[in-house]
Image: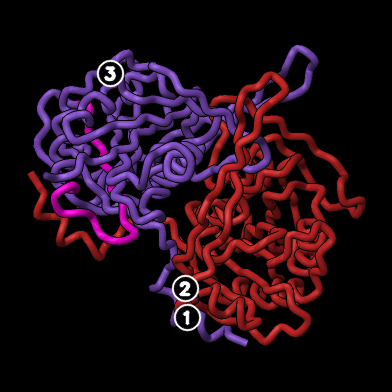
Chain colours: A purple, B red
Amino acid sequence: MKKEKLILVTNDDGITSKGITVLQKVMQKFGKVVVIAPDSAMSGMGHAITINQPLRLFKDNHFNNGVESYSCSGTPVDCVKLGIYEILDGVPDLIVSGINHGSNAATNVLYSGTMSAAVEGAMENISSIGFSLCSYDPDANFDHAVEIVEKVVANVLDEGIGEGVCLNVNIPDVQNLKGLKVCRQAHAFWEDFFEKRMDPHNRPYYWLTGDFVEQTPAEDTDLFWLEKGYATVVPTQFDLTAYKVMTKLKQWEL
Amino acid sequence: MKKEKLILVTNDDGITSKGITVLQKVMQKFGKVVVIAPDSAMSGMGHAITINQPLRLFKDNHFNNGVESYSCSGTPVDCVKLGIYEILDGVPDLIVSGINHGSNAATNVLYSGTMSAAVEGAMENISSIGFSLCSYDPDANFDHAVEIVEKVVANVLDEGIGEGVCLNVNIPDVQNLKGLKVCRQAHAFWEDFFEKRMDPHNRPYYWLTGDFVEQTPAEDTDLFWLEKGYATVVPTQFDLTAYKVMTKLKQWEL
């Protein structure tokens, strides 16, 4: 008899978000689920870890369905580390993160706490997937997203991903999903804007905001296919070495 | 007559650290320096940005040498964004981050605020370099590091790096530096350990700690050469796509 799979679920929108509520439910079809997620919104935390403060972690029954769940004061990467090294009974077979409220396509992967949790899983050599729906609506409809989650998870559990690689899965917020494409990360970026305001004591503060630059996305990128109504899968690695410039730079060696 | 270079200096140890004090001084040989750095320690913040809180930013004369400097409540990536989009008069020619107190070799690049500032620069298509000394001593000796900074900066200003690529430069804390090697990121990782303590109200809290796993580092990696007494330069990119597994995954397309 096959051993039941152990699945760690996390996110960056926090344990109270609709996206993780949907995700923990669908994951129960695939094995024993444990949820460890931030107790508040941790969007934009990237690969941050908490080293200058202690972490709080409390067991709760948040989902009222018997699923073991913990809320944590730390970042998504902290949640993954706590899962592997403190909470779980053994190394998980799978880490899933999300379902994020909002796209993590293109260079958003670098800012995303959701995706950094998956990258941390890959560093630990655990099959890991980040899921994002391209809608910031807190009450978004996740029906199409669930179909994609089931398809991708089934494939990953059957065939694995590859050493040091996780998946960045984005699902467009459309009525008729056209399919799923494996593609590369688009190189679009944010044109930032800081809104400067004065506090009641006449001292300035700044809100970070910005526009995602809508260049025509190159073919075979996640942005290209999302705009056409496809879900996208970008295999994502933690080796940041830019091998293509190595030869040129070697001339500098001392 | 050549226009003076505009250089943005930041770090993740905070504006009061010795490493950035040394770095802003040496960078004055290369152009006009503006420092925008966190007002407190931001180690381990990775590519985090501040979106759920406003940012504070105050001009000061921290270095008492006429260098324009700002301390910021945000992360290193926030500092780079504020520099480019709010403070600087034009796009900088160069962003340098550090000198970090502690190694950012191997997979540490992902957790490092110092390196994420450089990666953010690369995303904006600005030549960017993160410098780290392999010593956590707050009063470390940066003499060898300064030699490497001067060498690498001179090369970057002369020849550039490559589109979408920044540099991760680590300098061993040794008496006799053997040279400088261009190499790839080692795939070592942290074996984490959480120290569980009880607060005075008998509720648990956790400190993240851990050991960097000292496998024999593969040849041509940063860890390999650092252990042999060389400074290392890893060209570092923000495209995380794992092209090597693309063909296999394309079988999943719907």
Question: Numbered disc 1: what chain?
Answer: B
Report in which chain the residue with disc 3 lies: A
Q: Check the picture and name the quadrant holding the N terminus of chain A.
A: top left
Image location (x, y in percent) of residue A58 = 50, 24
Vertical order, B124 against B187 (above or below): above
Q: Are marks 2 and 1 in contact (CB under 8 Å)?
A: yes
Q: What residue is shown with label 3? A: A140
Give the residue drawn at x 79%, y 46%. Answer: B69
Per the image, label 2 sits on a secondary structure element best described as loop
Are tags 3 and 2 found on a single chain? Answer: no
Question: Residue B220 shows which numbered tag?
Answer: 1
Res B172 visible: yes
Q: Is residue A118 left or right of residue B55?
A: left
What chain does mark 2 sit on?
Answer: B
Q: Nearer the viewer, residue B107 or B190?
A: B190
The quarter holding residue B29 reads bottom right
**Residue drawn at 25 percent across, 50 percent down:** A221
Residue kind at label 2, given as amino acid type:
Arg
Q: Viewed as shown, does residue B182 lie left or right of A138?
A: right
Q: Earlier in the sequence, mark 2 or mark 1?
A: 2
> How far apart are labels 3 and 2 at the CA level?
42 Å
Segment colored magenta: A156-173
Along the line of sight, which residue is nearer the eye, B229 or B2? B229
Q: Is residue A216 visible?
A: no
